[in-house]
Image (tube, grey):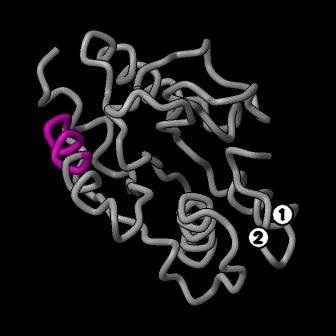
Amino acid sequence: MSIKNFNKTVEDIPTCILTCDKLTNDALKCRKRLEDYGFSDIKLTYGDNDDRLTNKKIHWQARSFISTCLDMIENDTEYVFIFEEDAEIVENRSDKFKRSIEWALQNKDKWDIIYGGCAALNPMFPSLDNLDLSYSSKAQAGAHSMLFSLHAAKEYVKYNGPDYDLPFDMA
């Protein structure tokens, strides 16, 4: 598949890469990999520096995820791609990734979260055919990519409580 074919599919969907200060270089490499596939509106999300989050005891990655959800709510952002800083798209499944995104955008009422990579535990929300369309460049377990809806962000913040002490991957 031509990389240019990905552009129209992802161009209007904001993308966040969850990261922290010490992993900025990994996040920048992830950004470059995503740009090569046509992602353009890419933000590095540093949850460990988000003043809205007062609970400093939770992991930076969970803080980055929560920060992304709060940004979605504040900006009324319908959907966001969320990638971990070490995520890579599985090259020989990139066409399936593209088709999955197209399906999601045509069937917005049928999903809230679509996992593009493995989930460390059984996901708390259904995934679309266990796609495994992304993986960790560091070979670690976790939910390496997902397409997340505003409804899911609101529900996550609502049920997580004021201290945001339930990391997404640990839910």
Relative placement, left or right, of 146 versus 33 is right
Q: Which quarter shows the N terminus?
A: top left
The answer to which image quadrant residue 15 occupies is bottom left
**Is 117 rendered above or below residue 77?**
above
- Helix, strand or loop at label 2? It is loop
The amino acid at mark 1 is: Asn
Q: Residues within 10 Å of mark 2 (few under 14, many from 20)?
A: many
Q: Position of residue 22 (x, y in %)?
A: 34, 66
Q: Which residue is mark 2?
A: 164
Depth order, front residue of 111/55 = 55
**Residue at the spot x=37%, y=49% of the render?**
85
Position of residue 91 relative to residue 85, above or below, is above
**Picture layout, residue 168 above or below residue 67:** above
Say whether marks 1 and 2 touch (CB < 8 Å): yes
Residue located beneath label 1 in the image: 160
SS state under label 1? helix
State the CA–CA distance, disc 1 to disc 2: 6 Å
Q: Residues within 10 Å of mark 1 (few under 14, many from 20)?
A: some
The answer to whether 51 appears left or right of 44 in the picture is right
The range drawn in magenta is 30-37
The residue at the point 62 percent across, 29 percent down is 119
Residue type at tag 2: Tyr
The residue at 61%/12% (across/down) is: 129
